Image (cartoon, rainbow, N blue to C red):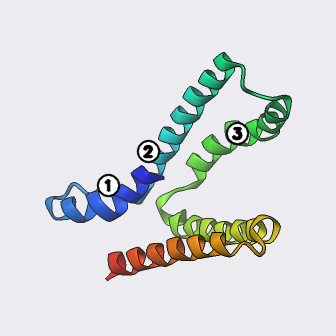
Amino acid sequence: TVAYTFGIFVYNPLFANKGKAISESSLTVSSVVIMAYTTVVVTIVRLVQGDISRDVFLCWGAVLWIVVFGAPIGSLLITAPRERFFRRLFYTLAVAQFIVFATLKIRGNIAAWIIISSILFASLVAIALHAA
């Protein structure tokens, strides 16, 4: 999320020398809480407006149990020694998800590939500059 990216690329470099850097674990937790809050608020607004279709409710019901049980279990499993493993697992799953998405949705859309390539390039440059 934007909060995590801000923490890694802006806040931590500015305040690391003062001993006020925020750990990646804390930034991850903060991002999850922000996303959960946003999801709840938007869901309530959509429910009040009556904008939610039956298919959305079915999809919500299909993944709800994963979030309800997965988040607490994940918070217990992600400890400092396991962070590197889960970070690599996350990156691997993100790449796999993108490949499936690109195969099914983007296909031959040149404009979409140009936009995605530009964003990917900018992200890699930011990561390289951050690591340097």
Left or right of 9 on screen, residue 75:
right
Q: Residue 89 appears at what percent x and percent y?
A: 64, 68
Whether pointer 2 and pointer 1 mark residues with C-beta atoms closer than 8 Å, the reply is yes
Q: How far apart are marks 1 and 3 (CA)?
A: 27 Å
Q: Residue 81 appears at what percent x and percent y?
A: 50, 65
The type of residue carrying mark 1 is Ile
Residue in front for this viewpoint, 69 or 110: 110
**Nearer-N-terminus badge (1/3):** 1
Left or right of 56 on screen, residue 4:
left
Q: Name the residue under label 1.
A: 22
Q: Mark 3 points at which residue?
A: 69
The type of residue carrying mark 2 is Ser
Residue at image x 55%, y 64%?
82
Left or right of 76 on screen, residue 12:
left
> Mark on residue 30?
2
| Element class at badge 2 | helix
